[in-house]
Amino acid sequence: MIIAAIVAACLGVALIGAAVVLAKDEPPETASSRIPVAEDTYVVREEPDTVFGARDTLVSVSRPDYYAVTYLKFQVAIPSGFRISGMSLQLQADAKPPAGLQVRSVLSSEWNERELAYTNRPGLGQVLGAPQVSAKNLVSFDVGGAVTPSDEPDQLPVAVSFAVTNASDTETLTMFAGEHGDGAPALAVSFIEVGAPDRAPLDGHQGGPKPSGSVSGTPSPGVSGSAAPSASVSPGTSPSTSTGNPPPPSTIPAGRTLCGASFYQENGESYTQALAREDGYFGGLESVRVFYPGAPAAWPGNAGKANRTVIVSFKYNPKEILNGSRDAYLKDWFAKAPRDRDVYWVYYHEPEDNIESGVFTAPDYRAAWKRLAGLADQAGNSKLHATLVLMDWTLMSQSGRKWKDYYPGGDVIDVLGWDVYNWDKNKYTPATDLVGRVAATSKGEGKPWGIAEMGSAKLASDTTGNTRAAWLTAMANETIKNKGLWITYFDIDWTTHDFRLRDSVSQRAWRSFCDA
């Protein structure tokens, strides 16, 4: 009884009317609560200044002529001596919900339903979970990753915000709001006493050998550098020798094109601070491009810290792969890769210039790919996707190249990735040319595809940035039309051009793509 009274007091006003259940006689102590929504509303792109917070329904839709996103905020009070161990967001739809629903974190909880409109909406962060729908159209999302232990104050309520998006361009999701009463949004939260062990993590990020050298990669638009030295590891067994059941096939996700970016850390910031800055620019990235100049950093590394779909590349000279000296480290790296998000792993992106200059040969590059794919298959992780990334220049007749010289075959490669840039100093090359070329090549090979790097400096004649903004929108739309998996903007001040989107109209254009 004493324990129950303490927990009820700590939960406070946020839990009025909510049941609290304590486990008895079995350590560790646990508690659970159903928390009603504190604030809820939706915003509409076509009515940018309209506030809908007083409505008793919530709407989410992505039609070309009507785009709406639902925002929800909860006040989660944490009992003293406890921490959050799990959360489930529960919404009542008025009919069978359409496919393509997602719940995403929100970058700020400094909003209220009486003032929130499309023009002042906070940006969206990572995708938190896929829906489960009951026979009575109750929609539940696992949102346990929305609050981390470092976010949890002692006893004080934590404001947690979510956005519900709907990728359907024909079907509207309508849900009951807090004003409706019955069926109002709720958050089911479980607590466990501080110091109790967590369940085993989904992705098994537990130590492992660490590579030498820098863990921050160096990309190169259109040019590849030589392989950086990396830690030596004893050769393992050949990946061509397999035992037990065959690995599950790579399952390529279907659905909307993900927006993303690659970026540098600036002004002494950490990787997570840089990621938060980019999320702020663009309303929340759905995918991130990560470069390792040599060996991939042990998980989590920057690729794992992104906590969302990642296109991650690493570099070894092919001979290091073929002699087996990297087998043990890479086998461990593949085994510890996340299993709760898609990892598009890339071996030596843009190898064309290196091969042309004699750093290594095309046959060795293709053979190294086959060996690496064998190592990845041994992990039995359907979220790992072998992704070949080449320059779009290689597809142009002027390059004198044949892209299949670098292609180890459809049995090795799951996804084709392309680095696409506007190099014209006088105009923005039409998206139909840039995207059309890589899309047609990928479709001709029967492979899913994406744009791993895309960028253009702002032309001197484009003083307002409006023309580049229109080009960005056209590039995104053309990629969506051709069913690209992702398109990541090269938001970096490179040695040859400053590709960063720092003018407000360009940022707004990319943010509109990320929000859609």
Image (cartoon, grey):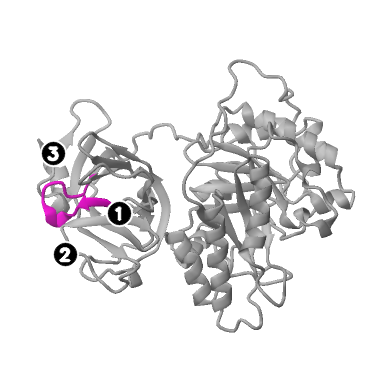
Sooner in the amino-acid sequence: mark 1 or mark 2? 2
As measured in the structure, the alpha-carbon distance from the residue carrying label 1 to the one carrying label 2 is 31 Å
Residue 54's tag is: 2
* Figure check: 266 above or below 452: below
What is the tally of numbered marks visible in this picture? 3
Task: Residue at 38%, 43% (x, y): give it.
Answer: 129
Query: Of all residues shown, which one is farthest toward the right?
Result: 358
Sooner in the amino-acid sequence: mark 2 or mark 3? 3
Residue receiving disc 1? 153
Q: What element carries label 3?
A: helix
> Residue 250 at what x, y percent from top left?
57, 33
Q: What element carries label 1?
A: loop
Neighbour tally class for label 3: few under 14, some 14-19, many 20 plus, Cα within 10 Å: few
Task: Residue at 53%, 72% (x, y): give it.
Answer: 506
> Residue 366 at what x, y percent from top left?
78, 37
Query: In this rendering, does residue 160 appear at all?
Result: no
Q: What element carries label 2?
A: loop
Q: Which region of the structure is painted magenta?
A: 173-187
Q: What residue type is labelled 2?
A: Ala
> Residue 358 at what x, y percent from top left?
90, 49
User: Is there CB contact under 8 Å for labels 2 and 3?
Assistant: no
Residue 4's tag is: 3
